[in-house]
Amino acid sequence: MSDTHAQTVAFVRESMVPPADPPLGETGIFKWVRENLFSSWLNVLLSVLSIAFVVWALAHLLPWFLQSVWDAGSLTECREIRDARYGEGAASACFAVITERWNQLLFGFYPPEHYWRPVLAFVLFLVAVSPVLFQGLPRRLLAFTAIYPFIGYWLLWGGTIWGPLLVIAGFVIGWGAFRLAEPRLGTLAAAIAAILLPLAWWFFAVGPIAGDLAQIAPIGLVRIGSGDFGGFMLAFIIGVAGIALSFPLGILLALGRQSHLFIINKSCVGFIEIIRGVPLIVWLFTASLLLNYFLPPGTNFDLMLRVIIMVTLFAAAYMAEVIRGGLAALPRGQYEAADALGLDYWKAMRLIILPQALKISIPGIVNTFIGLFKDTTLVVFIGLLDPIGLSNAIRASTEWNGIYWELFVFIGLLFWICCFSMSRYSMYLERKLETGHR
Amino acid sequence: MKRSVFFGAMAAGLVAGAASAATLDDVQSRGTLNCGVSTGLPGFSSPNAQGQWEGFDVAVCRAVAAAVLGDPQAVEFVPTTGQTRFTALASGEIDMLARNTTWTFSRDNDLKFEFTGINYYDGQGFMVPKALGVTSARDLSGATVCIQTGTTTELNLADYFRANNMDYEPVPIETNAEAQQQYLAGACDVYTTDRSGLAATRATFENPGDHVILPETISKEPLGPLVRHGDPEWGDIVRWTLNALVAAEEYGVTSANVDELAQGTENPEINRLLGTEGELGAMIRLDNNWAVNAIKAGGNYGELFERYLGEGTPIGLPRGLNAQWQNGGLLYAPPFR
Amino acid sequence: MTTTAAEPPKQSFHLGQLIYDTRYRSLTIQIVALVLLMLFFSWLVSNTVQNLATLGKDFDFSYLGQRAGYDINQRLIDYSSESTHARAALVGILNTLLVAFMGCVAATIIGVIAGVLRLSSNWIVSRLMTVYVEGFRNVPLLLWIIAIFALMTEGTPQPRDFREGGTASMLLFDSVAISNRGVYVPAPVWGPGSLALGIVFVLSIVGIWAWRRYAHARQERTGEILPVFAVSLALLLVPSVLAYFVLGAPIGLDYPELGGFNFAGGLHLRNSLIALWLALSLYTGAFIAEIVRGGILAVSRGQTEAAFALGLRPRRTMNLVILPQALRVIIPPLISQYLNLTKNSSLAIAVGYMDVRSTLGGISINQTGRELEGMLLLGGFYLLLSLVISSAMNFYNSRVKLKER
């Protein structure tokens, strides 16, 4: 066997031949280009087309971006500066409108001296959601998450601090009632008491007591009406409030949809399908045009609140489907184990099923939030001044009439940054939660 | 989770916004006037960089707030779209609507509103590029016309072209700003809306001279503030505030001299208007110096017009029909006595 | 085994059982829920009745029979300002269906192409597709609609420029004009005999279907593969073309021509339709691309390798192995994207496309003040549409579903 060698070559080299450089086409950039761009005729065609497209797009967009005007008081002024700087009629973006109005695009008509309030509310919001989003953080932070809604409300709308405090007290009352009543009256009666007592407290006691307390100890912030809310702040508040408020409702709907009780199941399915079958814009018009018909005569909410209610109901239907997915993804064994331990329905849900199901639903919830956040732009059609609505209002002023792309680019970019980072987060979470086997 | 927002605001809403019969009491106890305006129309209402609303319609709101509450800043402006404005008023979300709304029979009676006067006499017109060579609306057969939806202009346009046996292609647009863009790019040959709107729009073009407003006025568009049916007292307040502004111009009362004139003058009509004689204020359940406040808020009708629409502004509208009756206009305030 | 257990003692029913006995408890809960639900609805209805009475309005659909008074530019059926509100609603409904259908088709094509290209080994192409997908997914649809509409308005020439000596000219032998009022294309004119031609065409499609069935059955039986594509193409073209000339060219074309203010003749695809259609399909296409990509990735690599090992060529591998499996993953989310697109078509308001929300739920409400009636009808229409689409798609889904035996 081994003698074949000796027969074919006369001499055996004793030292290694130094490796030759690979052919030019097989190294570095050439290889990369060849393999990644020109590996077949189809690819050559696609690459050439793509490169042509990119060049064409950049050639049109770059001058517009680079020759931009950032300081001017009006569009006409912008055009004068452009003519002076880059020549008559050059492609030039007038970003001066952003420099002048960017506070308005972010905060709407919120009084400038109070800008710290939404900013603080936003920072605290990030703190409040972090334990939900990042499992590594201490669980104790969740307590802050629970009271954040009240802090956020108080910071944004202002008013006396006693209102939110007393509303929190309502939850404490409910919890206390349940604890006290359960050993004596049984679970059902305790649960009913835990629901009715706080409701009675909120509806009948909070208003007068808050009024009295505010007179005794006037602690509070300047009240700012919903009419002053606008811009990205508005979009964010509607989106966040919609998701946060729809969360409990969504859980109940998802459980209802899984329930074997015929009527409860069917009414939940009906609610979810009706809400999902009709576009959000129709619901928003309903909020703006019809909600007043359905409420007792004389009730009147401000429009933003009506929108939040409608968006909450809307998001709840989507949330229910996401959570239902989470519930369905749990292995049957979990349900059976809960039954085997002798837990009743609510205990099984609270202690075993929901914690797991909700955890795997978080990516879906984040995606629902992204969708809802983008959909908040629709409120422009009912006269709320979200970023797009403000861009119309800005154009209605004589200085900025006729400016389009700069505003669109700015708004689009802000939305893109928010949504893109959130979607990246949700993908990261999906990967982390994925225990599947590929 | 966030129930506090819900209940807190619900309680606030229940207390604050009841649309009861006595709007005046509501406004006074609330301390602010809720006034519906357009989301943005040059000259009539738009927010400035500080977030303050300004414009001709806005000024009417401020005058009413000044008359009722003594403070022209005590107004909560509620931006409304063409589609949401009437519901906002009917539901009690706003106390009055000043959103260049045309006074028509069916709006007054079928939609159950009460128009309290006319703050701007307008009419629907057409704007075309000069290059088109069109001189009369009769030449517009086959044209593409940009219109704002949800307004009476849509109906007028259909009627006009039908009556003159011409056909056209309507391009319905949601906002004035978009309509303007369509028109400027040549996506429509003609832009039609109220003549004031046309002038305001044209004023902001890069080359206003390249566009002409055709001589035809195809409809009457009396624009005015309106309130809900069923509260005549409130309607009277808005009506007479408007009349006070008009009368003030007629008698030469301006924001500059109103304080001086309010000390008393030789003219009993001015005295009654400014509350130094008679008890006119009490008759509409307001202070006797209600009209003084209203005039001080922004000036008389003429001053407002000059500030927001007149020839000194980019919009540059002539007074036309909106001049005082002595000057050949239609402004004619009933006597204050 | 004889059971010695005594008969369970006959229990007399007592009220406590309604709560504590699991047999009755679910019934109790349901009845309570039902009562609460009915109370809630009656509360809503009574509020509405009361509020309507306060406003002096009534609940009446007869306004649908009144003269609408406004014009609609795009109409698939006859309509003028003299027609009724009901007819205007119908025009709107057809317009909604039109843009939803066109959007679904285009979004699918765009989505499939983008999804496949995103997996391409070509670096620049896959990057470009990533930019497309992430760009469109993360910016509100409304902004895209407005931006595309504005782009089409600004970026295309106006009809005036097509005049003699103008800067723009028509494409494809003066048959297509792209202007900022829309695209004008030649419209077919149906002459006498076009019915016969249509019948021939339909028959040839039936023939193709029959041939495919036959070829498939034969392949199953004998393993012999018949040329499907070439025969189909021949069947599609030859009879129709022959019939066209035999019948003496019954279908003519009506070319758009510049006259007066506008192009006259031809088929006018309005900018509002095109902008809405493009924005909807690009936006939804980005989502579909992700679905398609996920579906293809979900088919494990071993399937491809196994198919190659069996000697299938790449095309057949794709058609016979990968796609059928990927489709199962793709179809359910695809259905919900179609539903989303249909619902999103209600954003037509932003570009002035006269869909059902703009007519029935917009101008009609605005001119008559019948918001309650109008919104109810509008909501009912969308709900019905959603139910129809989702049940049709679910039917298809259940057919391609993996049949576990």
Image (spheres, helix red, strand yellow):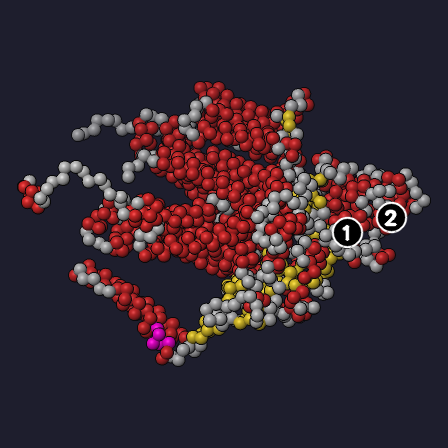
Q: Please report the residue visible at 47 percent of the width from the left and 44 percent of the height from the top.
A: C138
Q: Please report the residue visible at 54 percent of the width from the left and 66 percent of the height from the top.
A: C168
Is residue C241 on the magenta stretch? yes
- The answer to whether A54 appears left or right of C181 in the picture is left
Asked whether residue A130 is in view, the answer is: yes
Give the amino acid at mark 2: Gly
Q: Which mark is residue B198?
A: none
Q: Earlier in the sequence, mark 2 or mark 1?
A: 2
Which residue position is annotated with label 1?
B312
Q: Position of residue C276 (x, y in %)?
A: 50, 55
Question: Could you tell me what secondary structure mostly forms the magenta stretch?
Answer: helix
Q: Chain of mark 1?
A: B
Q: Which mark is residue B252?
A: 2
Q: Which residues are magenta?
A: C240-244
- The answer to whether B321 appears left or right of B186 in the picture is right
Quadrant for the N terminus of chain C in the image: top left
